[in-house]
Structures are given as C-alpha cells and as structure tokens.
Image (cartoon, rainbow, N blue to C red):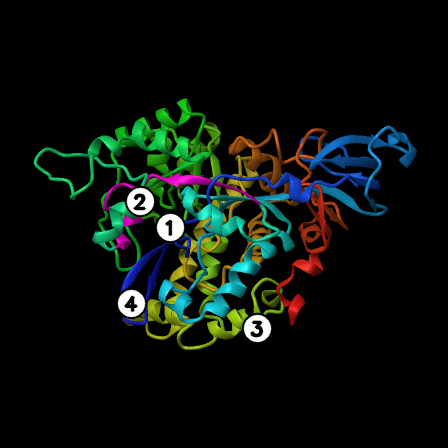
Amino acid sequence: MLQRDRSTHGTRVLRLGGLSLLVIAPVLHSEAAVSQDLRIENVTIVSPESAREIDSATVTIRDGRIRSISSGAPGAAASGPTAAQTLDGTNLYLIPGLIDSHVHLGGIPGMTAEQETAHPDIARAARDQFPRSYLYSGFTTLIDLISTPEGIARWKSHDPTPDTYFCGGAALMDGYPSNYLPKESRYRAMPYMLVEARPGSPLPPGVKASEHTPQAVVTRMKADGAICVKAFFERGFGGEHDLPVPQADTIRALVRAAHAAGLTVLMHANSLEAQTFALDTGVDIIAHGLWNTDEKTKPGELTALEKSVLDRVIAADVGWQPTLQVLYGLHNLFDDATLADPRVARVLPRSLIDWYRTPEGRWFRDSIVAETPELGAPSVAANMLVGPINRVAAATASMAQHQARLLFGTDTPSSPTYANPPGLNGWLEMRHLADAGVTPKQIFQAATLSNARALKLDRDVGTVQVGKRANLLLVRADPRKTIQAYQQIVKVILGGRVLNPSALAADRLD
C-alpha cells in the first residue's frame, strides 16, 4: 500500500510501504556466518505438509540445512553429525519459520528522509532493530513486494536478518503508486514501470517505451534477481482520484512474460473492480482483501456480486492476502494507547517510540485529519475505516469457510503509521484473521507452506523436512490448534543458527 511522506516543509515524497524505493533485493544467504552443527532431541515436529506430527523426534542440522529426522530415542540418529549444540525439545514443538509474503523494508515507518537525517541516532537504532523484530516474532523469511537490488546492501548489512526476497514493482507510468513521486525523479525511481505509449502523447525526456514494455521490465527484474512481479490496479484513495490504471492487455502480456521467466505475479487490488480485473488478467496472487466496493449491504454480509467475485478467486486457485491489519493499523493510529502497548516496546526502540509521541512524529496522523476536515476530530476520521474493516472481515470469513488459498501477508508497514510495528504486525494480523473465522490450522498453512509454494520457495522453506533450510521455531504449543503458539517462541533457528528471543527484543538494551 502506498505511503506518503512529507518533510517538515510540506514536500511530498513517495514511500512504498512506508519505506524508500531502494529497498530489498534478492536473498543472499550467509551460510558461512550461520553454519553450525545442531541437534534437537525429543521434540514433536509439526509440519504443514503432513496431517500427523512426529513425536519424540531427533533432528540434526549441518551447514544450515536439515540433515536427518528420526523418531524414537535420541540414539536413533547416532549416524548424524556430532552436534556443536544440542537442544532439548521435551514438551516443545518444532515448526517451520514463518513467512510474511508482503512487507516493505527500505525505510523507517513515519519518518521522512529529512527527519531521518535530522535524527541519525534514532534512525540507526530503528534500522538495527527491525530485522531482529521480525525474527523475534518468528518470521524467518520475508518477501518485499516493491524493491530493487540496490537496497539489499543496507538491509543485509544488519545481523541477524531474515532470509529476504523481492518483487519488482511494475507500476503504470504516472499511475499508482508512482503518482506520488515528484515528476523530476519519478521515472528514475521506478525502474520497472510500464509505459503504454499512445499516438500523439510524447514521453518524458529519457523515457524509452521500448525499455518499459511488459517483456522488457520482466527481463530486467529477472536479471536483477527478483522472484516475483507486483502489478497495480488503483484508481486512488484519500485525496487522490481518477489515477490511470493499466489496460487489461498490458497486464496479460506482463503475466505471460513473468510466467515464461518463472516469476509469480501479484496485483495490488483491494476493490471489487480491481479484484475482477486481476482475475480477468490471470495474475497469481491478489495482494489485499476486499476493502472497497460500491455494493451496499449490512455489516458482516456480502452481496451476490461480491460473492461471485470471491467464488472466481477460489475456482481459479488465485492466492489471496487479506491484509486485515492494514486497516486496523490506520485505525489504531488514532488511539493514544497504541504506543503504550508493552508489546510495542519489544519490537521498536525506546527512542523511536518517544519520537512518535512528539508533534513531529505524529505528522501522518495529523495529515489525515487535515485532509478530512469535514470529519472533525481524529476519532471521527478513524470511523471512516469501519465499513472497509467489516467488509474485508466478511470476505475473509467466506474465503476461509470455502477453503480459498489464503496467503499470509501483512503489508508492513502499509502507510507511515507506527501502528504497523515490524514483527508484531504479523501477530496482530493473525488475531484479526482468527477473529474473522480463519482457523489456527489455516493460518499456520498460510504463513508457511502456502506462502512458500506461491512464491516458489518450497524447495527451501515452508516445512520441516530433510534437505530444507533450517529456518525453524521451537514453540510451546501446537500452532494447528492455537495461534498462541506464536506468542510462546522458545528459540528461533535461522539457517541452523540458534537465536534467543530475549536477545532479539528491542528492549534488551533498556
């Protein structure tokens, strides 16, 4: 989701997912840095590809991957490596590390580039902490949906960092989200933008239509190491309306080129019109739930037309990311209790929390109120979200009931709101999914194997199986039965490297 950042002088610059455009790039595993022999004994394995757990299992790990799995007494795996470290898994569950398939990692939510320059110590603490916050919450794999290779050095310069992959953002020239960028930098900042050349319409200086065809941008993304393509259908929101949207033939060509290159195609589509367009053009994943529609109905209900579109999603086996927390994150921006939540102190540095409480740090909330003067107080402005929240909750309930291919993604951060804290936002998303009727088993599947398959990462992650990368969690409860399992993480294992949650928490230094 687009985020608009404004400097203290009122200049508007684009942030995608609240972050700068130079964000995450292809994954670079530091196997040498994390390689160590590990043995986990007497543990119960719960993996999404199997309906049955493995009791009293012994798991051996070498060079960052699972080497063997055996059940019974620990001696059953005597042929495995001599572990440099042994973990006792008694009364614990070993599960795959979680995958968030919709994040934006390039910047600091709610902090403009000018503000980051003005507060370097706060910014440094935040950037150091954010990768740890995802790991603290159990997320060992992340997919940044709008990125370029250049950002990888900054994100991967921190240690430890979740395994991270990226999509290239194929935005239509002058459409969402590039419309928020100043024109003097817009076209340079969107290397994968699509151009629909029209007779008699001159292109901006330096822009060549031949370099921005669907085939050309996919070729460039593939060469840059992207694993997916992000397209957009958005006519605008807030103060922006009537933005240009791509033609169906353009997106169909984009899908063909992407599939030929082995890339998954996602589409930003949060309205009934947009999700219909996504289905008509053959994309693989709809990024966002059904937030917006002109259909009129009672809270908690769906119209026949809405149901028919969701039925098409299910019939076509298109992945569907509800991203419920996006709307709640905006809603919670107007709740002063948000920053007082003790869980926030576990994922955000104290200095950043304190800054968010200042007038400078509240600029985004204040800008929303300023843009909607007819609504009056911030509490009234927050009520704008009630309709979309009810609608997407009803749609999510229907999709869960009908066994749709739900994918777990948070869109963290969806806007410059401090109410989308990294890592914690995933737990909040799970709570909303559960409240909407998604079962713990469905959430577990969506955040592990379903995500891995959808992004073609299932050879490496998403299950607890021999040969897979050892991105794992030791938890105290069975995640198929309760989402509280993700609040009871004992150890995070990243490529075989054992991490203690207490050492990952933001308040470890307080």
Question: CA separation, marks 2 and 3?
Answer: 37 Å
Residue type indicated by callout 1: Leu
Q: Give the image location of residue 477, x and y in percent.
A: 75, 49
Q: Which residues are magenta?
A: 163-181
Residue at the location (72% across, 32% down)? 51
The residue indicated by pointer 4 is: 371
What residue did someone put label 3 on? 340
Quadrant in the picture for residue 229: top left
Q: Position of residue 160 (x, y in %)?
A: 62, 51
Q: Earlier along the polypeptide chain: callout 2 or callout 3?
A: 2
Q: Secondary structure at mark 3?
A: helix
Labels 1 & 2 near each other (Cβ < 8 A):
yes
User: Which numbered mark, 1 or 4, is in the foreground of this view?
Assistant: 1
| Image spot of residue 369 (x, y percent) | 34, 70
Asked whether the viewer can see residue 233, the reply is yes
Of the numbered discs 1 and 4, the one sitting upstream in the chain is 1
Neighbour tally class for label 3: few under 14, some 14-19, many 20 plus, Cα within 10 Å: few
The residue under the point 56% across, 65% down is 348
- Residue type of the residue flagged with mark 3: Ala
Asked which secondary structure carries label 2, the reply is: loop
Q: Crowding near pointer 4: few (<14 within 10 Å), some, many (20+)?
A: few
